[in-house]
Image: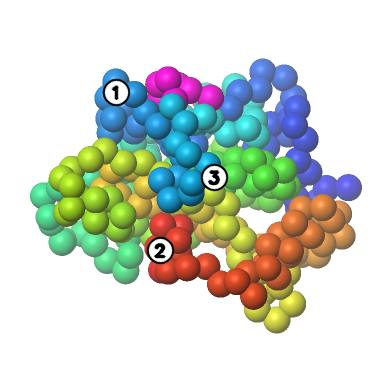
Amino acid sequence: MSILLRRFYLNKCCLCGDSGNLTGEHKIKLSALRDEFGNVPLYIGGWDDPDNPPKLAQSPKSKFFHFAGKICKECNGTKTQKADRSFHEYHKAVKDSIKNERSDRWENGIFKHPDFLEHSEKSDWLFRYFAKMLCCRLAESEGPTPISLAKFAIGEFNQNRIWLNVRREPIQERFANEYGGWPYAAHGGLVVYANRRNREPAGFHSSLSIGSVQYIFWFRLHWLEKIELRLQHRKFYKFCKNIALDKRNMPTDPDTLEKLGLS
Ligand SMILES: [Zn+2]
């Protein structure tokens, strides 16, 4: 029974729960990849993992750039068009601000553009974009999606639960200082926030890096969602808890923390 969390099904949209006409959302927005890389050969993967060498992706349309967890065509189209547009516009403004080395409009870890004032329509849609990304990240790991978060992503619920930080991409900045302005894009996968005492999952986090900008976004589970996760989604709950237990004895190194937007 799903009350607050929508169970993961491979053949159902992780945002609205419908089946049919399913498609894979881009892990990194296609237009942003095109802006950043143009039409050059793209390699995808980690550069610091010898067991997982980068793979050649034929183009930004490659399957490597799509989430395996699916959303339906309507959710990927009309229902999230405004979110995609808001993100595109905001990203352009952030990129320009960094390029022109402007420090105004940056406040408390966020870029405050006058078109994206708090609670404005554009700001709401911008946050809906990150809600969609987190729902797709959860589905990618076969986890349930909080129904209020999924409904927020497609404009059917108004309460925003997403927290966002925006900053200059630290790795790209180091690359740019050492080697010049190489195009760069990365995502931070799905990170589980765990309760320090009992290691139960408490929230989920991800990051998205495009060129000189890193977006860090997360949400915290409501206590009722935590109970539902523990009782109704045992496999995913154990998966998350085991990661947290493993990390207790093997803390993440500082470089990875920075890459994931956790430091
Ligand atoms: Zn849908």
| Secondary-structure class at tag 2 | helix
Task: Depth check: give the residue in front, 71 or 139.
Answer: 139
Density class for disc 2 (Cα within 10 Å; few <14, some 14-19, many ≥20) is few
Horizontal side, residue 97 vs residue 86: left or right: left
- Among numbered discs 3 and 1, the one appearing first in the sequence: 1
Q: Amino acid at mark 2?
A: Asp
Q: Which residue is mark 3?
A: 51
At mark 3, the secondary structure is: loop
In primary-sequence order, the first of circles 1 and 2 is 1
Q: Which mark is residue 40?
A: 1
Residue 13 is situated, as x and y percent measured from the top left of the image, at 69, 31
Residue 149 in the image, given as x and y percentages of width and height: 62, 49
Magenta region, residue range: 57-63
Q: Secondary structure at mark 1?
A: loop
User: Which quarter of the picture shows residue 180?
Assistant: top left
Residues at circles 2 and 3 in contact by the CB criterion of under 8 Å: no
Q: Is 229 a magenta residue?
A: no
**In the rendered image, is residue 131 in sight?**
no
Tell me, for residue 184, which label it has, or none: none
Note whether residue 42 is visible. Answer: yes
**Alpha carbon separation for disc pair 3 and 1:** 25 Å
The residue indicated by pointer 2 is 255
Amino acid at dot 3: Asp
